[in-house]
Image (cartoon, coloured by chain):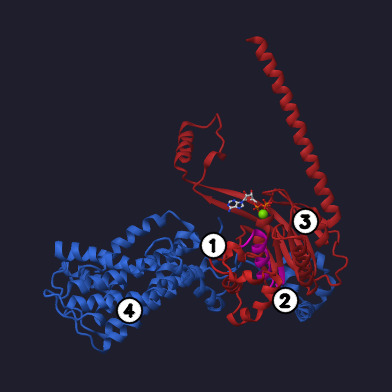
Amino acid sequence: MSEKDPAQESTSRIPSVIVDDVHVKYKVIGSKGSKVQAHHKDSLLKKLVRRGAKITSAGSTEIHALRGVSFIAHDGEAIGILGTNGSGKSTLLRAIAGLQPVSHGSVYMRGRASLMGVGAALVKNLTGERNIMIGCLALGMSVSEVKEKFNDIVKFAELGDAVYLPMSTYSHGMAARLRFAISTAITPDVLIVDEALSTGDSAFKTKSRRRIDEIREAAGTVFVVSHSSATIKSMCSRAIWIDQGTVKMDGAVDEVVDAYRAFTRHSRAERRRRRRLRRKRRAALNGSGKVES
Amino acid sequence: MKRDVRAARKRARVGGGQSRQDQIIIPDDQLTPDALAARYGLAPVGRRPALLPYIREIVRWLPFTVMLGTSRAASKNRNSYLGQIWSFLNPILNSLVYVLVFGLLLDVSRGVDNVIGFIVVGTFMYRSFNDVVQNGGRSIRRNQNLVKSLPFPRAVMPIAAAVSEAVMLLPELLVMLIIIKVSSAIPNMTPVIWDWTLILLIPAVILLYIFSLGVAFMVARVISFIPDLGNLLPFCLRLLMYTSGAIFPVSRYFSNETIQNILSYQPVAVMLDLVRQVTLSESTIPFTWSHWLWATGWAVSFFTIGLVIFWRAEARYGRE
Ligand SMILES: Nc1ncnc2c1ncn2[C@@H]1O[C@H](COP(=O)(O)OP(=O)(O)OP(=O)(O)O)[C@@H](O)[C@H]1O
Ligand SMILES: [Mg+2]
């Protein structure tokens, strides 16, 4: 493996998560849609079948979202995951948490992962208080544990009296605080933060960063997905760049973030150049058309 | 946590199947991933646990299951003026329709002493079974969002659906008993006389729920992989309703004894008769303990087989 030993500061090099050649294929039932391109050489029967499938939206497709991802994470590491939209970051993290069945390869882990997915269990028209109960139970705590942690959670989320209001009255940031507070109420062995910090204000960001550091110091491992390279740089020691379902780069955070930035800048420039070319060609065509008519 | 690490190191030194020398010679970065995982005591993620640990997990998540089920039940009839009253009106109106059509118009309930009681028990109990199977069976697909974000054992979803039905059951049973009592006052109907066996209504309903949950497990597994079969489910359940004697004593329409026996000892029919034994005084459905043996047998075997069937696909739910 092409690791450049980015976790220099961690004393122990105990693996906590091993991802070994993981492939994930989504099965999409009932949507052959327009994705299937027609070939001129296809037989009439094939064309008819395709047309029929398109109209009735029968059949199924597979989306190969991860194509052989391998890496090893160690205790006390914070790893940033970078990549464009749809590159497979969330899929990878769900696979690590054991929530997404993998079609090939395997993931090994010590302890429990928390994906900050309590949001799915919370009920909008119930109060924050009740939602803390539901969320904590959804993470597998017992009722007595929840009662014990309740005050800590309220204090961390800084909701004040708003805990006694329905969650539908919360702002985005308030709801995000509550979710973060609930998911980190028990220190998980592996914490996975997928775009969960983007809506908090700066005070909360600092606070959540401190919490993440605490988890890391307790020899846990943290994965952070963010589209902000500043967030990744400030929180992580190592970064992995996922591109179209494969690991494009894995190493020290500065190198990877810089390479990723250069790549996006380059591809944006490339796109701009192509657009300009296209426009020019179109203009030329239009011009000639006018002359003809 | 620190202790964990030390334990892992110790385990690494002692080693799984390899000799101590190998352990020292091969450095970490030359091991295969699974050997490395074994050295540091990492467990594979997303694998199906053994059956007993799985059941223990289900028990551990019971508080969440109950919470989910009750809050679902509470939010069921939110957007209507009558609110929760609909959960009573529904089965009442339902049984009223069946009493009118089958009991009075078609008069198919030949030889039944108290037609209203017979049909009301049949429809109330069958509706319960029907709803547990339908909602439990679809629960994995319906709650993709939850399944994809939290690591509970997947069996929590069908169980929560059953809990959500059970929450409304106690008041429903009361309504059912009141209707039976009222029907006794109607001239054409034989009056119903209750004795101590009425208490057995509670274990009878519990057996019905255990059985229904078993069926829901099987249906849930099938539907989550072949959703198309979900469209056939209502038809199957309706067919089952007519062949189980929920509305009229179907087995009396056959003279062949084998068919009669099959129709009256199939699980749903047994469950319905069990409830009728204790709540009605039909001369053709006397109280017999042998029926309880049948019911217990069916409930336990369906629940066990259903749970095993469901558990076998545990690691594969949520591939969409
Ligand atoms: N439920 C799903 N069904 C089918 N395909 C999916 C599903 N979820 C994701 N995909 C596909 O898998 C690929 C990876 O998606 P994923 O959500 O992991 O991307 P991501 O890197 O997290 O993107 P983003 O930065 O937008 O969050 C995409 O091509 C997407 O179309
Ligand atoms: Mg994502």
Q: Quadrant of the N terminus of chain B?
A: bottom right
Let me know if marks 3 and 2 both belong to one chain. Answer: no
Residue occupying the point 44% across, 75% down? B304
Of the numbered discs 1 and 2, the one sitting upstream in the chain is 2
The reply to whether callout 1 and callout 2 are in contact (CB within 8 Å) is no
Q: What is the number of callouts on the image?
A: 4
Q: Chain of mark 3?
A: A
Say which of marks 1 and 2 sits in front. Answer: 1
Which residue, given by chain and number where applicable, does mark 4 sit on?
Answer: B295
Which residue, given by chain and number where applicable, does mark 1 sit on?
Answer: B317
Marks 4 and 2, how far apart at CA: 49 Å
Q: Nearer the viewer, residue A106 or B280?
A: B280
Callout 2: CB less than 8 Å from ligand 1? no
Q: Chain of mark 4?
A: B
| Residue B17's disc number | 2
Q: Nearer the viewer, residue A118 or B54?
A: A118
Query: Residue B199 location in percent, x, y?
Result: 31, 86
The hue used for chain B is: blue
The hue used for chain A is: red
Let me know if marks 1 and 2 both belong to one chain. Answer: yes
Marks 1 and 2, how far apart at CA: 33 Å
Image-quadrant location for residue A216: bottom right
User: Crowdedness of circle 2 by 10 Å Cα count: few (<14), some, many (20+)?
Assistant: few
In magenta, the rendered stretch is A170-190
Amino acid carrying label 3: it is Ile
